């Protein structure tokens, strides 16, 4: 078991849960963060405890709330004494036609996806600076680059903001902390559960590999960026989308 500690935001399910498992497989101690899904977070915590020789804890925290982020980081420091790796993964998405979008809904998406990434990066980078090293891995989306999806302007803008934070923080936190960003394309998770079969087929046809990703295929890249094998990669935006192309 290594003595590294990783915090993965939004890891009760989907890509975040897969990141927690794949990092634990590498002997990294993991902190599972959830907002609503206590049951899934505890299930994952037990699965990791039983299967991997690492320490694991789960913490409820709404990453859009500053006081909750501070309390989560305090609990991690009390338990582990440090954080080496931060995966800013938690996010929400709600597709609504432009004319039906409310300021409240738009702001909520920015609060979780963008402000949440800012808050976790702010408080964890303070710990990493004291530690003398650290890796921050942001999860944005190809929607921030070019595969915009109708009715998700708020989500797409929040993810473009995450790319901007990546470049900004990478410059400010260098050379102590590396900051990189992954832009997944379509991934088989709850986030896409409302798509009809015909919508899935239509989107699959725009992907060179002709299928959505398994969450593990994103987690594998997170593991690489968290490891020393990526020691000279910094300030980078990495597409993991099976070779998608916009029409
Ligand atoms: N799926 C895709 O096709 C796709 C494509 C491109 C990018 N991405 C990005 O990949 C990341 C993971 O997506 P996913 O598909 O795995 O999502 P998901 O299955 O919908 O899971 C979202 C996770 O975020 C957590 N979460 C939501 N709001 C939160 C908050 N306020 N505070 C803390 N945690 C919160 C959820 O926790 P609870 O369940 O406990 O509430 C859950 O663990 C996201 O950044 C997403 O934008 C996904």
Image: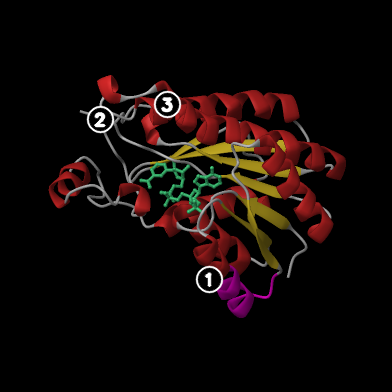
Pair 2/1: label in front = 1
- Distance from mark 1 CB to nearest ligand 1 atom below 8 Å: no
Query: Can you say which quadrant of the picture contains the N terminus?
Result: bottom right
Q: Which residue is mark 3?
A: 106
| In the image, residue 102 lies in the stretch drawn in magenta | no
For image coordinates 56% across by 33% down, the residue present is: 236
In the image, taking residue 72 as reference, residue 236 lies left or right, namely left
Quarter holding residue 232 = top right
On screen, residue 200 above or below 215: above
Q: CA distance from mark 2 to mark 1?
A: 38 Å
Q: x, y percentage for residue 70?
A: 74, 41
> Tag 1 or tag 3, which sits nearer the N-term?
1
| In the image, residue 51 lies in the stretch drawn in magenta | yes
On screen, residue 34 above or below 245: below
For image coordinates 80% across by 60% down, the residue present is: 79
The circle drawn on residue 246 is 2
Q: x, y percentage for residue 89?
A: 53, 45
Q: Are marks 3 and 2 in contact (CB under 8 Å)?
A: no
> Tag 1 or tag 2, which sits nearer the N-term?
1
Q: Start and end of the magenta stretch?
A: 45-54
The circle drawn on residue 122 is none
Q: CA distance from mark 3 to mark 1?
A: 32 Å
Query: Can you say which quadrant of the picture contains the C terminus?
Result: top left
Helix, strand or loop for disc 3 = helix
On screen, residue 197 above or below 51: above
Quarter holding residue 3 = bottom right
Quarter holding residue 46 = bottom right
Pair 3/1: label in front = 3
Q: x, y percentage for residue 44?
A: 54, 68
Q: Which residue is mark 1?
A: 43
């Amino acid at each position: 078991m290594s003595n590294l500690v990783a915090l993965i935001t939004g890891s009760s399910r989907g890509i975040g849960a897969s990141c927690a498992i794949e990092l634990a497989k590498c002997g990294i101690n993991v902190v599972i963060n959830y907002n609503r899904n206590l049951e899934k977070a505890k299930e994952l915590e037990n699965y990791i405890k039983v299967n991997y020789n690492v320490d694991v804890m789960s913490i409820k925290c709404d990453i859009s709330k500053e006081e909750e982020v501070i309390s989560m980081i305090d609990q991690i420091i009390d338990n582990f004494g440090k954080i080496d790796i931060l995966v800013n993964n938690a996010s929400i998405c709600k597709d609504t036609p432009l004319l039906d979008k409310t300021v409240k809904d738009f702001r909520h998406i920015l609060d979780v996806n963008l402000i949440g990434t800012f808050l976790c990066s702010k408080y964890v980078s303070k710990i990493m600076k004291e530690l003398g090293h650290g890796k921050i891995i942001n999860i944005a989306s190809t929607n921030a680059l070019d595969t915009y999806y109708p009715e998700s302007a708020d989500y797409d803008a929040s993810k473009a903001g995450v790319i901007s934070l990546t470049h900004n923080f990478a410059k400010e936190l260098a050379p102590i902390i590396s900051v990189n960003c992954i832009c997944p394309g379509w991934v088989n998770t709850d986030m896409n559960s409302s798509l009809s079969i015909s919508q899935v087929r239509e989107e699959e046809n725009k992907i060179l590999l002709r299928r959505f990703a398994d969450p593990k295929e994103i987690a594998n890249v997170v593991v690489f960026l968290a490891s020393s094998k990526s020691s000279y990669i910094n300030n980078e935006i990495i597409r993991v989308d099976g070779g998608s192309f916009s029409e």
